[in-house]
Image (cartoon, rainbow, N blue to C red):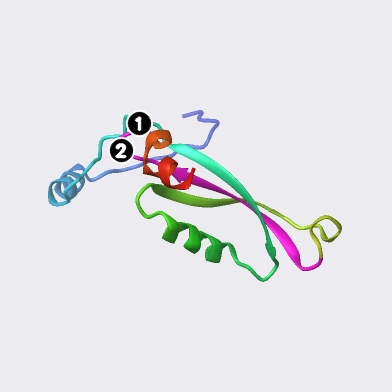
Amino acid sequence: MDIRHAVYYADFNLEYLLKLVRENKISAKEPSKYPSSRRDLALVVAKSVKFQDIASIVRKADKVLLKSVNLFDVYENESQLGADKKSYAISMLFEDTEKNVERSRYRKDYG
């Protein structure tokens, strides 16, 4: 057959796949027509503070508009931050499906 590259083969049981599709309800949600808003925040904290603690506090502050909290940088430098300190850079994603986030309750309540 003179095949010089690796050959891969897949065999799908179409009847089984169709059965799974019929048995499981598939749901979808229309994407919001209003854009989300991302805010970044850098915090200098004690080295003993865990990101999960900060994320928990942020999630408690807004349970309506806040969609995600992510850690994207950890910086440690004793001469710049002080002994036993570190900096967390976090991003927060806000989304309102009824109106633009900039004009929403978040903007009025928190500035």
Residue under circle 2? 97
The answer to whether the residues at label 2 and label 1 have Cβ atoms under 8 Å apart is: yes
15 or 59: nearer the viewer? 59
Check disc 1: other Cα within 10 Å, few if <14, some if 14-19, many if 20+: few
Above or below, comparing residue 89 to residue 49 in the picture:
above
Residue 2, disc: none
Residue 34, disc: 1
View extreme (bottom): residue: 48
Amino acid, disc 1: Tyr
Magenta stretch encompasses residue 93:
yes
View extreme (right): residue: 79
Above or below, comparing residue 100 to residue 45 in the picture:
above
108 or 104: nearer the viewer? 108
Is label 2 in a helix, a strand or a loop? loop
Spatial separation of the CA atoms under disc 2 and disc 1 = 6 Å
| Residue at the image point whose x is 34% and y is 40% from the top | 96
Is label 1 in a helix, a strand or a loop? loop
**Percent x, y of residue 20:** 18, 50
